[in-house]
Amino acid sequence: MTATCAVRVLLPAQLRRLARVDGELTVPVAGPPVSLGAVLDAVERRHPELGGTIRDRGSGRRRPYLRYFACEEDLSHSPAGAALPPAVARGDEPLLVVGAMAGG
Amino acid sequence: MSGVRVLVGTRKGVFVLTADGTRRDWTVTGPLFGGWEAYHVTGSPSDPDRLWAALSMGWFGQQLQRSDDGGRSWAPGGNDFSYAGVPGTHQSFDGTPHPWEFTRVWKLAPSPSDPDTLLAGVQDAALFRSVDGGDSWTEVRGLREHGSGPHWQPGAGGMCLHTICPDPRDDAALLVAISAAGVFRTDDGGASWRAANRGLVSDGIPDPDAEVGHCVHKLARHPDRPDTVYMQKHWDVMRSDDGGDSWYDIGDGLPSDFGFVVDVHAHEPDTVYVVPITSDAEHYPPDGRLRVYRSRTGGGRWEPLTSGLPQEHCYVDVLRDAMAVDRLDECGIYVGTTGGQVYASPDAGDTWTPIVRDLPAVLSVEVQTLGAAS
């Protein structure tokens, strides 16, 4: 039987406003382990308006000015199927979707 | 009671400016969607409470928002603008093949009669249609698949379909303009298209009178005389009297025939407005004076309109979607600038007053005429 993890995700302010969420959101993801791609799939299922805002719709690639951090690690270049740290799967730590600082 | 609602898209959000029919006292609402670039905000002609905002941001891509209560509340629409089939390539700035990539919506064109139907012009250039109020989009693929598509090149702002100019007599007839491919015409609802650039001459392309490759900035036509179409090209102000099949120059007498906007008086098909800009390198008005030029003869003879507009030290630009006209009995004209001013003239251009002075750079201005109006 597959268990379900309650994964915490913190989106950039612009996307929180778009999705009308305050602070973190928590999404159910099958696991552990839970993969980065599965978490983002769950976020987009709950908030279809975020489709295309984090990952390119066609290729699934991370948009260039966004990064994924968790547990003080940069997971931006991890494959979509790579397992997130156990603390994220347990809900102890959030997955951070971060907008790059840009604009000078 | 009549009134106007001016929808302003800026580099950092949407602003809504409202006034009664006198257009003297204004209420300013915004920013809505602060931080998002609002390339176009517009309303349904058949349901003025239905509005759409095309928003984008480098970080997060494209968003479409819709309001069904005149802008008091908004909800996300569909933002999936996937090209039909395998889109192939167009040319990049350096002339090498570049895959078609969606970047943003530049222009929304709601149906005059159906509040659920609208068209969207996008970058990289293509046309999309929605029949569910903007929840989902299907490409009108015949345009992008025009045989000249692989030769289209971007203008400085990207390869965008920025102008959608319907023929009010026929839902299936349409002109669109693409930078820097030019004008295309369909008479069968978008199934087939033909280039409509005969008479255009553009320095800076290998064949100055080529069938495609012209940097057309904006088209406008009057609903009572739709075969007459006005154009602001990169350089040159042009006119067609055959629905876009051929064009001739009407820019003599302007201090510069470079510019972005062109629009037509709501009740006088021969009265046309442009805002001359110095050059393609100097995107500000000639001599530091912001002048709207009006022709009451359909071009050829022009008069500067200056009363209330800055006549010294003015170095703003007026972008292609930043002029609009209302349909009140005395036609109002609205101009937005990259300096964040929105100027209104309640008397067809004779006098101007700033509604707001310090918005983010204005990308688009649309006007809804509410209540009794002709």
Image (tube, rainbow, N blue to C red):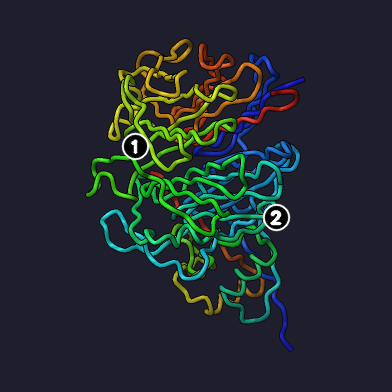
> Helix or strand or loop: what does disc 1 sit on?
loop
Residue that numbered label 2 is attached to: B132
> Helix or strand or loop: what does disc 2 sit on?
loop
Query: Which amino acid does the dot numbered 1 rest on?
Result: His
Quadrant in the rendering for residue B353: top right
In this view, B86 is above or below B28: below
Give percent across and percent down for residue B304. Answer: 40, 15
> Viewer-proximal residue, B150 or A44?
B150
- Label 1 crowd bin: few (<14), some (14–19), many (20+), radius 10 Å: many
Query: Which amino acid does the dot numbered 2 rest on?
Result: Asp
Query: Residue B128: in sight, yes or no?
Result: yes
The residue marked by circle 2 belongs to what chain?
A: B
Name of the residue lying farthest toward the bottom: A1
Residue occupying the point 35% across, 43% down: B198
Query: Residue B319: in sight, yes or no?
Result: no
Label at residue B234: 1
- Label 2 crowd bin: few (<14), some (14–19), many (20+), radius 10 Å: some
Quadrant in the rendering for residue A77: bottom left
> Viewer-proximal residue, B49 or A37?
B49
Residue occupying the point 64% across, 58% down: A49
Residue occupying the point 35% across, 55% down: B152
